[in-house]
Image (tube, grey):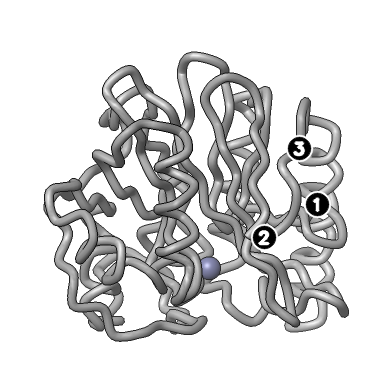
Amino acid sequence: MKVATHGEHLVQLTQRTPLFPVNCYLVREDDGLTVVDTGLSGIAPAMLSTVRALGAPILRIALTHSHIDHVGSLDALHAALPGAEVIISTREAPLLAGNMALEAGEPGTKVRGGFTKVTTRPTRLVTPGERIGSLCVIASPGHTPGHIAFLDERDGALLAGDAFATFTSTIVSGTWRMRFPFSAIATWDKPTALATARALRALNPSRLAVGHGPVLTNPGTAMDAAIAEAARRLREGSAHAA
Ligand SMILES: [Zn+2]
């Protein structure tokens, strides 16, 4: 597992797979660490030895969404750290528990992507605007219905989960790439994902830290280009459908 530090507060842990890299993150706080996403299964021992080297305890495990490559090591981490909070959005919690039903008012598109059975139950459900240490919870539906991002209010770093990806090049969730088709395959509702991308861009983040691909510093230009491409493809797709 590769470990990289970005600024004072953010540590990126990257798990390599034959298909694509999977990131999870450690966010340093005065009282300890918040884990953001837990990768595929099997990374808990490497994450815990990295954490030992940092000399701070994991107090919170926060999930952007419930796809298998973000919750894969949740049970193992929870078993090792039974006192740590487990945090997910109120809307995403049913998906983590295996209930894919859509709610009233949501687009009727079927939820997509890979899910796995998780026995750990969240100890805290959050809604946008709440705080997890220095992280502000940001609504970012589209990839999944209850996807959330986290904005570090100390330095403007945005942990965006799969709302964007930077593997191959920067894309909005749902944009097709030959070498990385999974964002397109696993995204629930593309118009919602595009609206989310615009809302995240409007936060003017100093860093963009995503589930798949490198952490970008000053990501505004790359986000603008990704949003323009997603908007164009959506228009063209609608034209085809009409
Ligand atoms: Zn995902």
- In the rendered structure, find residue 170 and report the number of the disc placed on it: 1
Residue with the mark numbered 2: 212
Q: Amino acid at mark 2?
A: His
Q: Amino acid at mark 1?
A: Thr
Q: Nearer the viewer, residue 35 or 219?
A: 35
Residue found 65% across the figure and 61% down from its top: 173
Give the percent coordinates (x, y) of residue 180: 78, 74
Determine whether, in the image, residue 138 is placed left or right of residue 23: left
Q: Secondary structure at mark 3?
A: strand
Identify whether 192 is placed above or below 176: above
Give the percent coordinates (x, y) of residue 39: 49, 65
Query: What is the spatial separation of the Cα atoms under label 2 and label 1, in whole angstroms?
Result: 10 Å
- Evaluate if marks 3 and 1 touch, with contact meaning CB atoms under 8 Å apart: yes
Determine whether, in the image, residue 204 is placed left or right of residue 146: right
- In the rendered structure, find residue 216 and report the number of the disc placed on it: 3
| Earlier sequence position, callout 2 versus callout 1 | 1
- Evaluate if marks 2 and 1 touch, with contact meaning CB atoms under 8 Å apart: no
